[in-house]
Amino acid sequence: QVQLVESGGGLVQPGGSLRLSCSASGTIFSTKYMGWYRQAPGKQRELVARLDAWDDSVKYTESVKGRFTISRGVAVNTVNLEMDDLKPEDTAVYYCYGALRATEFGELSDYWGQGTQVTVSS
């Protein structure tokens, strides 16, 4: 069984910074993607940033480019999201996401964390 656990988040003023971390644990054979999605009230969940573990390539949604940075954590199967110059429109619940294979011949499956609230407000 795979679990993704997030930490970080909270309340910050516009222009401030926050750091989110996510750790995947359990039976994991390999990881393809780890990243972050977010969902604001009344909106669909959207991809924020994603790291491809096979080639270290990254993908960001346009609105966060130049402000957010996704990176591998020190431990295996961990990922961090540094968020700078935060704006009120970044307010949302942020979910850690992993596309992982639990066994050598198993399917690549999506796993989600429980979500952490990020609120940007003065």
Image (tube, grey):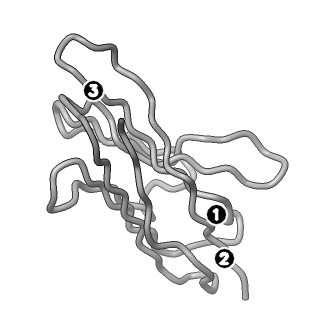
Residue occupied by mark 2:
120
Query: Residue 112's spot in the image, x, y percent?
Result: 49, 42
Residue 84, image x, y percentages: 46, 73
Q: Is residue 69 left or right of residue 36?
A: left
Q: Secondary structure at mark 1?
A: helix
Q: Marks 2 and 1, how far apart in space?
A: 7 Å
Q: Residue furthest top?
A: 105
- Few, some or many residues within 10 Å of mark 3 (<14, 14–19, 20+): some
**Residue linked to disc 3:** 102
Gap in angstroms between the C-alphas marked 3 and 2? 36 Å
Helix, strand or loop status at disc 3 = loop
Please give the name of the residue rendered at 57% of the width and 63% of the height, measured from the top-left corner: 116
Instruction: Label 2, secondary structure: give it.
Output: strand
Identify residue type, mark 3.
Answer: Ala
Q: Earlier in the sequence, mark 2 or mark 1?
A: 1
The answer to whether marks 3 and 1 mark residues whose Cβ atoms lie closer than 8 Å is no
Label 2 with label 1: CB-CB less than 8 Å:
yes
Residue closer to the observer: 116 or 118: 116
Kind of residue at badge 2: Val
93 or 112: which is nearer to us?
112
Task: Name the kind of residue labelled 1 in the image.
Answer: Asp
Which of label 3 and label 2 is nearer to you?
3
In this picture, residue 23 sits left or right of residue 44: left
Tell me: residue 89, above or below residue 108: below
Q: Residue 122: x and y, percent?
A: 73, 89
Q: Residue at x 80, y 54 (%)?
A: 41
Considering only vertical position in the picture, is 83 above or below 12? above
Instruction: Say how many tags the image has.
Output: 3
The residue that mark 1 highlights is: 90
